Amino acid sequence: MAEEISKVYQPSEVESKWYARWEEAKCFQADEASDRPAYSIVIPPPNVTGVLHLGHVLNATIQDVLARRARMMGKEVLWLPGTDHAGIATQSVVEKKLRKEGKKRRDMGREAFLGEVRNWKDEHGGIIIKQLKRLGASCDWDRERYTQDEDYVKAVLEVFVKLYKDGLIYRGERMVNWCPVSQTALSDEEVIKKKSKGFLYFMRYEIVESPGEFLEIATTRPETLMGDSGVAVNPKDPRYAHLVGKHCWRPFPRKEIPIVADEHIDIEFGTGVLKVTPAHDKADYEIGQRHGLEVIDVLNPDGTLNALAGPDFEGMDRKDAREKAADKLEEMELLIKREPYENEVGYSERADVPVEPRLSLQWFLRYPSVPEATKSVADGDITFRPERWVKTYGHWMENIQDWCISRQLWWGHRIPVWYPKDRVKEIQFGELDEEEVRKLIHVGTVPPADAENWTQDEDVLDTWFSSWLWPFATMQPDTRSKFFPTTDLVTGPDIIFFWVARMIMAGYTFEEQLPFKNVFFTSLIRDARGRKLSKSLGNSPDCLILLDEYGADGVRFGLLRIAPMGSDIRYDEERMKEGRNFATKLWNAVRFRQMQTEVRAGVVPAEPGIYATDILGKLDALEDKLETAYGNYRFNDIANHLYEFFWTQFCSWYLESVKDDLGDAAAPEVKAMTLQTLDKVYRRFIMLLHPFMPHLTEELWERLGFGQEGQFLMREELAAARLPWDAAAGAEAQSRVAAIQEGTGRARNLKAEYQLGSNRSMRFVLKPANDWVAGEVGTLCLLIGASEIAIDPDYQSEKGVPAAVTALGELYMPLDGLIDIEEETKRLQKEMTKVEKELEKVDKKLANPNFVDRASTEIVDEHRQRRADWDKRLEQLREMLANLAG
RNA sequence: GCGCGGUUAGCUCAGGGGUAGAGCGCCUGCUUCACACGCAGGAUGUCACAGGUUCAAAUCCUGUAUCGCGCACCA
């Protein structure tokens, strides 16, 4: 039977088998009618057409660990899954694909294009859901939601209408971040700053009123000079005071433009003169407003220059126009120099091109419930982990700007606003003021009754305008009453503003309460060289290959073991290997258990020995450590504690110590007790490990016969598993076992130092330091690899016999004919040097009267004890050395 | 510029006033009847630097350097 079990754990079949069984038995389903305390998480919805990357794996694994742990702690758990339509991301992908086929969305028209997007969604949608299942995610799939489900859409539109009616949503012509590739406005959060190398161009504009006099101007963007409608200097700048109020010549198209004074200008920067382009820079726009300067938009929505830029430039891309404008200035002898320059340029997150500040008519939201949302985090009603994000959040909330929520896209929730057909032009071109517009338009979740007379707003809403409702818009009323507010939110700090902050505001605004109690921010995963994982760099591993190669459990465990609180993770495939190895270790330990023959029925197990008592005590300690670590969301600690306990304490020490108690020669009572202890440890350890390695543990639970037919480990409760613990007996057993382990280490070291194979059985003599060690000789032989350990209080060793001072007493390893006095002397001297150094350190401290007076008694006593121990050890070593010499 | 984090073994990181730790890697020895995805042993540290507080500093404080990240400005 045992022979048939593979030596390595093969996860693939086991994992798919158990996942199917869990799903079939509805193990993940949350019951809103349950009496158990609720525990809930909503998944950060991945892009519906996305594929699983390592960030998802980490994030989903953490949520799964929390959900599975909560179930085992007796909670009624809802882990609500779903996907996001991801407006701009999905639309960009489909547009890119169409472009390859030579099609453009504007040529196709709205309906045809949306058809294409839906096809794409049907083709690729749900892939990531399958992949999450592959990982073992215990989501309640019956409650899976999508941001474009009918009732979800309704919720989004209702929110829009409500906020509009409350006066928080308004239309306005403002400077927005324009993405020339996607051709839509973006929110400030969607703009990422990138260092960009370019030039600072120094040029000169001639003064109109005094020909021959020039004003030197530094700019990074000569391509927009056609849109200049003024030049500004600081009013305090004496160099230019005489020019304020005069004019200079814009070289092309040639035109007189005023020279104004504005506080905003930095005297130190460049020449202290700014060319003002109100249409293409936020700050310039504001200066322009202050001084009544004309707004001249020289760019088309796609980033090419328009007719206002003049015939030389019309149709040219802004990037090419930059050099061309500089060249032209040079020809006109107006360019002084090009100076290499690096500055930060805002890029469109999605299209990865510089955004263009652009004046346009958009919908904005004045954020609601800002004070409540700020306070709840500051006061700790909502906890953030790591805590430092509290400050980042607070800072953003304090400087919050209105949110541009309209997007010039087609894929998304269309803005529920209709304009009377005969007034559309006036409204769209901003000819009417806000009040007049409000009176004319229809804002509602359904179109006006006489729809034929109305035109719906062309734009859709920012994706995040739907995501911010996720924690409650995904729940039906009965579900909501049980599971909202949710317990934990697990997400990346990169979307703290995009999503987390907005959800908190939405919670207070629409549900009058916080949407979740704790937020755990996961680490950002980087490659071994510290770079972000990204598709374009090609440094992102294929998760499915990883899952196949190391098993879902191996990947989960490996990743969590290196997931620190707060800092980034350096991803290394070696870690996955360690996870897999750990799975195999556990697999083999169970295999070992299954190879044991059972004792015959009716044998009464003996009282637990010191090894059993010790390991059970350590298991208790493990459980305590896990409790604390879970409380602090220290997943790496949990994983490491599990690993250390099982591998080192249980396999390397306990199992090795009791192998003789399992043999045929062992007393049946002792064997029964040992098997019983093994099973206690397996049973509880497997339960504790389950959230991290769900499939393997479920498999072993069944193989070991712990579960009842039709029951699952994942539905077991941990609370009942703990055993009573005799503290006094436990402490004595643990101290003896610790001494045995220390002595074993020294004996093994002796063997290794003399180049004796660890499998070679050696004979030892022990001058015992206590009266109980004689009873443990059998185990010691097993652990050390000794044929015999003779207990001899009066042992006088021959000259040069290798020896070590141990917690068990002085241990000698007589080597017939192999004695090398010189070697042994060296060895002992090395050991003595170490001890002397330690002794010196302690002595120095104890000799300091300040230390003895001021340090606490426990500390001083502990130092005295330490000195005594080192002292004794040194004395023993001296004797051995003397014996060697004599 | 403001804020946040990091700098500890070859690598990745934990620790956070009282004897410097783990995993991997490295070296040595083991086909020991659960496991070579394994077993046993070993080496390796001015805890970035400089001051300060303290009986005692890797740990607390101040400053510096350096690397990240976020925010604001940068024409």
Image (cartoon, grey):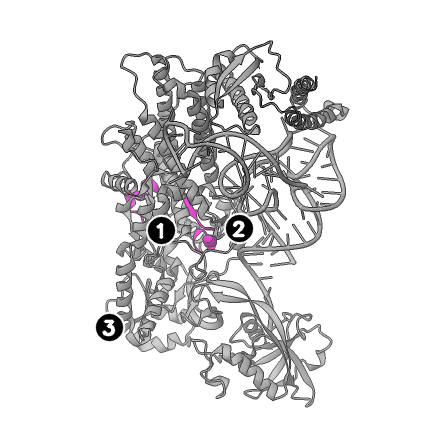
| Residue at 31% in and 32% down | A700
Side of A224 where A363 appears, left or right: left
Instruction: Give how far apart the Cα atoms at labels 1 and 3 are.
Output: 54 Å
| Residue at 36% in and 51% down | A545
- Magenta span of residues: A471-500
Identify the subunit bearing mark 2: A
Callout count: 3
Side of A370 where A594 appears, left or right: left
Residue indicated by mark 3: A452
Residue indicated by mark 1: A545
Q: Residues within 10 Å of mark 3 (few under 14, many from 20)?
A: few
- The image shows residue A783 at horizontal and vertical percentages of 47, 23
Residue indicated by mark 2: A394
Q: Residues within 10 Å of mark 1 (few under 14, many from 20)?
A: few
Instruction: Give how far apart the Cα atoms at labels 3 and 2 are.
Output: 47 Å
Which element type, helix, strand or loop, lies under badge 2? helix
Which element type, helix, strand or loop, lies under badge 3? helix
- The image shows residue A589 at horizontal and vertical percentages of 37, 30
Give the answer, above or below, for where A271 lies relative to B10: below
Question: Which mark, by number, is residue A530?
Answer: none
In front of the other: label 2 or label 1? 1
Dot placed on the residue nearer the N-terminal end, 2 or 1? 2
Quarter-wise, where is residue A603 in the image?
top left
Q: Nearer the viewer, residue A725 or A539?
A: A539
